[in-house]
Amino acid sequence: MRFNLLGPVSVGNGGAEPVPVQAGLPRTVLVMLLLKPNRVVSAEELAQAVWGRDRPASAAAGLRNHVSRLRRLLEPAAAARVRTVAPGYLVEVGPGELDTEVFVDACARGRLALRAGDDATACDTLTQALSLWRGSRWPTCPPGPAPTPMSCGSRRPDCWPWKGGSRRNCGWGGTRS
């Protein structure tokens, strides 16, 4: 399984091409759940992301409907990962299945390699991390304050300060984006 937030939101199974999750409230629910993988996101927090201050009186029923729609949009294996757990919902994500986590891990490994003077490993690792980005950021971000520093592409520059130190050894003369 592969969950992608670094660019257009998509979900893939095995080696198959990831399926984009089209704009709408079910995608907002998925993004919010993936920002806190394997942790319960309260119905209150999801309702805030979906409706903001304009929450309808029927928000609880509406949220259940959006989660149900999300499950129908996903392949069965991915849909089974979206679970109802009091007081809200969670998405089960295994190691290496969420691109944002892979990105952060690769940046950390690249930074360590650079500090150790291993420019070749740093270059390979940081290039691999940056290749996970499939566009500048999600087409839309949940309303309200960003739930994590990763939201809306804010962590992409994290790789550049470390990569800049090995830019000459990577064969890059200028800035990449």
Image (spheres, rainbow, N blue to C red):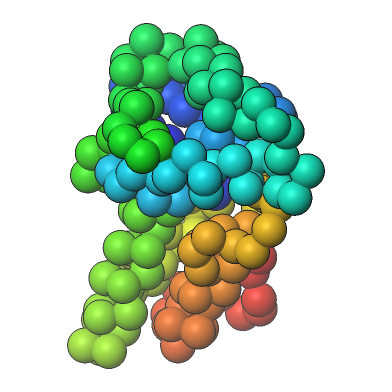
Q: Would residue 83 be visible to someone looking at this image?
A: yes
Where is residue 85? Give x, y as percent: 30, 32
Where is residue 47? Give x, y as percent: 59, 41
Q: Is residue 118 left or right of residue 161?
A: left
| Residue sitting at the far front | 57
Q: Nearer the viewer, residue 170 or 139?
A: 139
Q: Nearer the viewer, residue 97 or 143?
A: 143
Q: Nearer the viewer, residue 4 or 15?
A: 4
Q: Is residue 145 left or right of residue 73?
A: right
Where is residue 155? Give x, y as percent: 53, 68
Instruction: Give the vertical position of 43 relative to 170 (above or below).
Output: above
- What is the quadrant of the C terminus in the image? bottom right
Where is residue 37? Give x, y as percent: 34, 46
Q: Is residue 97 left or right of residue 164?
A: left
| Residue sitting at the far right | 54
Choose top left, top right, bottom left or bottom right for residue 19: top right
Q: Residue at x 62, y 23 (%)?
A: 62
Q: Residue at x 33, y 26 (%)?
A: 83
Q: Would residue 4 be visible to someone looking at this image?
A: no
The number of numbered badges drawn on the structure is 0
